[in-house]
Image (spheres, helix red, strand yellow):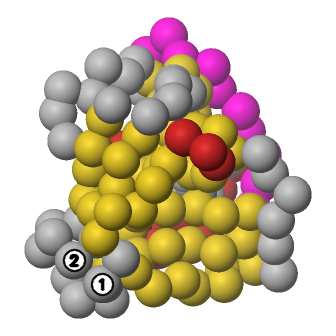
Amino acid sequence: MKTGGCLCGAVRYEISLELTPVTFCHCSMCRRWHGHVGAWAAVDRPGIAVTEARGLRWYASSPKVKRGFCGECGSSLLWDEDGEEKMGVCVGTLDEPTGLRPKAHIYLGSRGDYYEVPEDGLLRRNELRT
Ligand SMILES: [Zn+2]
Ligand SMILES: [Zn+2]
């Protein structure tokens, strides 16, 4: 069982199934929403339970995607996409040790112009998203 939550504690969750390895998303939407690159893992929906939802709010960032965040402290927390078996979790909100390892960089074609992504042995995908 893993646990996690927002900065202020108004959102807490438990993870009871295996999380995927971590994907770093460089798309412009993630950069705005996280303040920088998004770091994501995902878990089958039955494997996540929100144990404190007092602060939980959802923002529909596209027609099929809702992003969950804390309305009290602003932490970015969850990704809920229609038709997806898994829910995304912002791995920076997990309590440590996470036991996770990184896997890939995605949307590198939409990377910000203010940083580089050194060759680090991870998968690299160059999709564009504006
Ligand atoms: Zn909070
Ligand atoms: Zn993204």
Quadrant of the frame with the C terminus: bottom right
Q: Report x, y in % for residue 108.
A: 63, 43
Label 2 lies in ligand 1 vicinity (Cβ under 8 Å): yes
Q: Is residue 28 left or right of residue 93?
A: right
Quadrant of the frame with the N terminus: top left
The part of the chain drawn in magenta is 119-130
Q: Nearer the viewer, residue 108 or 19?
A: 19
Secondary element under disc 2, as helix, strand or loop, is loop
What amino acid is at disc 1? Answer: Arg
Mark 2 Cα-neighbour bin, 10 Å: few <14, some 14–19, many ≥20: some
Going by the picture, which residue comes out furthest to the top? 121
Residue 28 seen anywhere in this rendered image of the structure: no
Q: Report x, y in % for residue 107.
A: 67, 47
- What residue is shown at x 72% (from left), y 71% (from top)? 65
Q: Are marks 1 and 2 in contact (CB under 8 Å)?
A: yes
6 within the magenta span: no
Q: Report x, y in % for residue 36.
A: 38, 60
Occupied quadrant, residue 20: top right
| Residue 79, numbered label | none
- What residue is shown at x 64% (from left), y 48% (from top)? 45
Residue that badge 1 annotates: 54
In terms of sequence position, does the residue under pointer 1 or pointer 2 come before the other? 2
Q: Nearer the viewer, residue 121 or 45?
A: 45
Q: Is residue 50 left or right of residue 128?
A: left
Secondary element under disc 1, as helix, strand or loop, is loop
Residue that badge 2 annotates: 10
- What residue is shown at x 65% (from left), y 75% (from top)? 66
